[in-house]
Image (cartoon, rainbow, N blue to C red):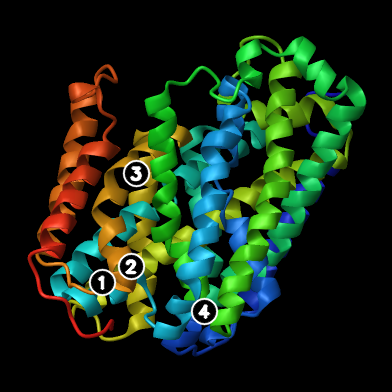
Amino acid sequence: MSDELHAVDIAVILLYAGGLLALGLFGARRNQDHTDYLLASRRLTLLPFTASLVATWYGGILGVGEFTYRYGISNWIILGLPYYIFALLFALFIAGRIRHDNFATIPDRLRHHYGETAGVIGAGLVAVLTTPAPYVLSCALLITSIFEIALLPAILLATAVSLVYVYNGGFRSVVRTDILQFMLMFVGFALLVFTCFREAGGLQAMKAGLPPLHLAWHGGNTTQVILVWFFIALWTFVDPGFYQRCAAAESPTVAKRGILTSIGFWVIFDFLTLSAGLYSRLLLPEGSEAAVALPALGLAVLPPIAKGLFFAGLLATIMSTIDSFGFISGITIGRDILWRMGRLKDEVTATKIGLLLMAVMSLLLAWLVPSVVKLWYSLGSVVIPGLLIPFLATFWLKRPLTGVPVMMLLATAVSFSWLVLGLPDGRYPLGLEPFYPGFMVSMVWTFVSHFTTKPRSGLS
């Protein structure tokens, strides 16, 4: 096979890009009110709910390929299994409540339970957590490998394309384009894995050709590193993509069933991506660049047309997350901060301004931290400790937490300081990963607050 894209492959990719823009731009309603623009009028049915949530979950696909190329099947232990567990718990105990309570965003919920200051701080944390920077970087790396352009122009292009139709059509455009991208991501990876299986063989070939650690559950990672990734998977509970789709669902039942159905599709897609990552280590030359292992494998083994479909599927996997996270980040910056502070009068206009500010922030992060896995790790380690417990407490605790704004800031500051202190050589104080000290602060604060305040008569 040729290690380059043919004209027909480029045509397939451009056809995907044109279809994406057409769906996003020309199907949008004019003069949308804020509920329609932000939540598609809360009428999301099971099929679009599932397709949108599944597609949104895999924006860091190049990071998945990078991790599998380096550490083998431990990718599934770290980036798969814990997310299924927490998504299941989310579906069973939280999804229906979100739709029933009718708070549009996580900051809205925090504001209702803890006051204005907690809402603003929560909005700041959500804005950082949902920055599409890791996915913009993934898309830019892929664009550079397809069209051989420099990284910075590729970052600008990835941001601009995803922003234009979201800016125009809001959440309806996100969901509509996600359905197309859901189909392409499965088709593209199924073609790649089937071709590799036919060319190289299955499990026996992997056992014979892969380094032994690639088939070990830990992949050579320490127990503490694996545990911290497991804790980072708690991200699921405060994932604004989950929250937004549940808030937009037609009913609490749709919200619950949508997440349960999504888990099944995630299992299938994880099998495909894990297999592709292992084949990349098996079939690519020694010393290949891990960050682009999946596109390199596609170039090496796929024939024309299939190659174009695979690269369109890769782009679809990433773009579906850029537009979703970019939109949520825009809502958070524009509506949940600027509009709530009285800086702007209209929620839709505020969100559009937030989208522009989000784009600038994402460009800077993607340029300054050029590693998808490092961006995931850093953002999760710093933000989740300050956000997780205050959010979950709104569903279950009968005693209201006190001093929540201070708790959120302190937990975040401790984890951020730990991260900064370990940046020069990766040696963190006391040998603890940054997530743990911030989470401990949050846990201790919750324990003290819970047992020093009077229980309330009922949950809000």
- What residue appears at the point 52 percent right and 72 percent down from the top-left corner? 245
Residue position for label 3: 379
Nearer the observer, 287 or 85:
85
**What amino acid is labelled 4 in the image?**
Ala
Residue position for label 4: 248
Residue 359 at what x, y percent from top left?
A: 39, 55
User: In the image, which is nearer the foreground, mark 4 or mark 1?
Assistant: 1
Mark 2 nearby-residue class (10 Å; few <14, some 14–19, many ≥20): many
Q: CA distance from mark 4 to mark 2?
A: 16 Å
For label 1, the SS is helix
Residue position for label 2: 332
Q: CA distance from mark 4 to mark 3?
A: 26 Å
Residue 197 can be seen in this image:
yes
Q: Is residue 169 left or right of residue 360?
A: right
Tell me where residue 55 sits by quadrant.
bottom right
Dot 4 or dot 2: first in sequence order is 4
The quarter of the picture where the N terminus appears is top right
Dot 4 or dot 1: first in sequence order is 1
For label 4, the SS is helix
The quarter of the picture where the C terminus appears is bottom left
**What amino acid is labelled 2 in the image?**
Thr
Mark 4 nearby-residue class (10 Å; few <14, some 14–19, many ≥20): many
Q: Is residue 363 left or right of residue 60?
A: left
For label 3, the SS is helix
Residue position for label 1: 110
User: In the image, which is nearer the foreground, mark 4 or mark 2?
Assistant: 4
